[in-house]
Amino acid sequence: MSGTVAQWERWTGMAFPRSSRYVVPGGLDLLAVDRERDQGLHEETNLWMRHPDTMTRI
């Protein structure tokens, strides 16, 4: 999800004074803020795992 820095500040109630990566409430990954481009980008990593079937069949 992307938006301007002002949008992200409004959505989160936080201030992002410099370009960096920030922890945001409810986010599963960091928010990347680029002040020069006036952009915030939040991408959550998709991770799929396969678990062995350990259930005993009766």
Image: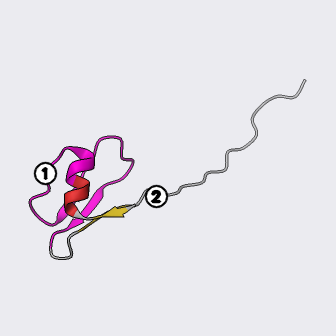
Q: In the visual, does 20 lie left or right of 31?
A: left
Of badges 1 and 2, the one in the foreground is: 1
Residue 17's x, y, as percent? 9, 59
The number of numbered badges drawn on the structure is 2
Residue 24 % position (x, y):
27, 47
Q: Judge from the rendering whether residue 40 lies leftward or rightward of residue 47; answer left or right.
A: left
Q: Quadrant of the C terminus?
A: top right
Q: As shown in the figure, which amino acid type bears the numbered disc 2?
A: Thr
- Circles 1 and 2, Cβ within 8 Å, touching? The answer is no
On whether residue 50 falls in the magenta region, the answer is no
Which residue is the site of mark 2? 45
Q: Amino acid at mark 1?
A: Ala
Q: Is residue 21 magenta?
A: yes
Q: Position of residue 36 (x, y in %)?
A: 15, 76
Q: Give the residue at the far right of this rendering.
A: 58
Under circle 1, the secondary element is loop
Q: Residues within 10 Å of mark 1 (few under 14, many from 20)?
A: few
Q: Residue at x 15, y 70 (%)?
A: 35
Outermost residue, bottom direction?
A: 37
- Residue at 60 percent of width and 54 percent of height: 48
Q: Residue at x 25, y 55 (%)?
A: 8
Q: Residue at x 35, y 64 (%)?
A: 2
Q: Nearer the viewer, residue 57 or 32?
A: 32
Q: On the picture, is 58 further left or further right than 34?
A: right
Q: In this rendering, is residue 51 above or below 2?
A: above
Alpha-carbon distance for marks 1 and 2?
24 Å
Asked if 29 appears above or below 33 in the picture, the reply is above
Disc 2: CA contacts within 10 A as few (<14), some (14-19) or many (>=20): few
For disc 1, the marked residue is 15
Q: Magenta segment, which residues?
A: 9-35
SS category of the residue bearing label 2: loop
Q: Along the polypeptide, which appears first: circle 1 or circle 2? A: 1
